Image (cartoon, grey):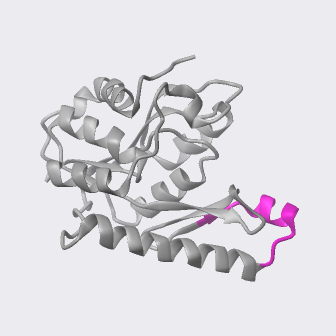
Amino acid sequence: MIRFADRREAGQRLAAKLVAYKDRADVIVLGIPRGGVVVAAEIARALAAPLDIFITRKIGAPFNKELAIGAVASDGTVFVDRALIHELRLSEQQVAQASAAQIREIRRRVALYRRDRPPLDLQNKVVILTDDGVATGATTLAALRALKKQNPQRVVLAVPVAPRPVVPHLREECDELVLLDAPEPFFAVGYFYEDFGQVTDDEVIELLHAAA
């Protein structure tokens, strides 16, 4: 089982697997805030590529916000676990309300992080999407499906760790998967880091400003 000192080390290890994309004018690195931006900043620095954010938010169950019933991306793309929703006997109205709450939070974060900077144009680009790890896969799948709508040339998903059962679903939704470890059993993303402290909004803004 692999372990990382912190998110920066995870990004550096991923960057070592992505050297084929170094110094290419068509490559853009996207991080999923907040923790994924720290990982993405290391990859972007190593590859000499632009850095941007791609925001997705987990949709939590009404009675347990930590239980993901799906996810929503910044363009409004919604991914839901229909089997789980049926099992939990949730109504469409409950799912819609939970989704709307996350869309509002995404809009808040977009305004906070981007300020007056427009998003990078992803059309015909090689997009490297990263996060600090994958748990249920909901937010990552929502991000990958939303990215496809922007007509990139290629989508590369680069993540440090993911649960083994989720890996086939991730491969289906991207052109290339760069994964450092897929342990089984999988406890939580933070288990694979010595330092997994919460990343602040200010840190995300600082990383984006430095990259710009």
In the shown orientation, is residue 83 left or right of residue 32? right
Q: Position of residue 91 (x, y in %)?
A: 80, 78
Q: Position of residue 175 (x, y in %)?
A: 42, 43
The residue located at (61%, 42%) in the rendering is: 135
Q: Is residue 129 visible?
A: no
The residue located at (54%, 26%) in the rendering is: 192
Residue that protrudes farthest toward the top in the picture: 1
Residue 83 on the magenta segment: yes
Number of marks in picture: 0
In the shown orientation, is residue 153 left or right of residue 25? right
- Quarter in which the N terminus is drawn: top right
In the shown orientation, is residue 38 left or right of residue 143? left
Residue 85 on the magenta segment: yes
* Residue placed most toward the observer, 63 or 88: 63
Q: Residue 39 occupies which quadrant of the picture?
A: top left
Q: Residue 170 occupies which quadrant of the picture?
A: top right
- Quarter in which the C terminus is drawn: bottom left
Q: In the rendered image of this protein, does residue 77 appear above or below residue 155?
A: below
* Residue placed most toward the observer, 199 or 87: 199
Q: Is residue 9 visible?
A: yes
Q: In the rendered image of this protein, does residue 4 appear above or below residue 61?
A: above
The residue located at (24%, 48%) in the rendering is: 207
Residue that protrudes farthest toward the bottom in the picture: 93
The residue located at (39%, 33%) in the rendering is: 7
Q: Give the residues in magenta.
A: 79-91
Q: Position of residue 183 (x, y in %)?
A: 62, 24
In the shown orientation, is residue 201 left or right of residue 206? right
Q: Position of residue 49 (x, y in %)?
A: 17, 43
